[in-house]
Amino acid sequence: MQCPATTTATRGRPREFDPEDALATALRIFWQRGYEGASLAELTEAMGITKPSLYACFGNKEALFRKALDLYEREKLCYVSSALEAPTARGVAERLLHGALATHCGDNDPQGCLGVISSVACGSEAESIRKEVIARRASSERALVDRLERARAEGDLSEDSDPEALATYLTTVMQGLSVKAGAGTSRETLERIVATTLACWPSK
């Protein structure tokens, strides 16, 4: 699929751009700046398109962000679904924590988590975005609770364990890793946090 990028070009034909490449660029800007911090001017300049072309191909800024968030979940958070397929509850925790570490603290992408950055948006313009991010996070946490409840039913976790509390504990640590990564905390320190978290994981 190609979308017109400008209204004028040589021989009177509009130049075209790859919407997938443009969306990947928009994702990076949102990831670096957050929803509120990313202006339309910055987005269109980075994407190499005009504002009319952005509206025509992606909709408004909010619609563009939602598409970028979909891409983020498909490409950057794929470790979550893999983690839920781990054969043990501890394996789930290990995959989630190491996946978060690799995603939010890598060398090639912006530091931190797009969801965490955008969930703290506070302006009236961003309220629907904040609610969207929180709703998606709640859905992921529910899937994690379900997986840990299954682990308890299978005897992989003790009968007195609390799957909901464990899921909240894990997601809180993961969000904390993101915040610390965004603040410049060293990879070594974050790895120690992961190791400490796993050392505290309940045995059967």
Image (cartoon, helix red, strand yellow):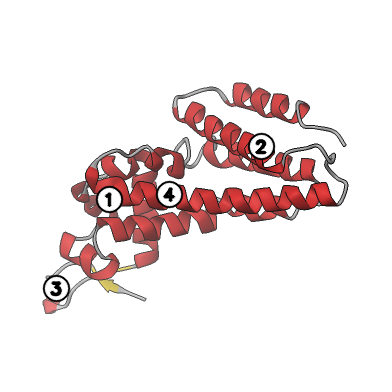
Residue named by callout 4: 133
Give the class, few, some or many, for how many residues have Cα within 10 Å of label 1's Cα (few <14, many ≥20): some
First in sequence: mark 4 or mark 3?
Answer: 3
What's the CA distance linking mark 4 and mark 1?
24 Å
Q: Which mark is residue 46?
A: 1
What is the quadrant of the N terminus in the image?
A: bottom left
Q: Is residue 86 visible?
A: no
Say which element carries label 3. helix
Q: CA distance from mark 4 to mark 3?
A: 42 Å
Secondary structure at badge 1 equals: helix
Instruction: Say what amino acid the circle numbered 4 marks.
Output: Val
Structural distance between the alpha carbons of marks 2 and 3:
61 Å
**According to the image, label 3 marks what residue?**
10
* In this view, the mark in front (2 or 4): 2
Q: Residue at x 62, y 23 (%)?
A: 188
Determine whether the residue tagged by mark 4 lies in a helix, strand or loop.
helix
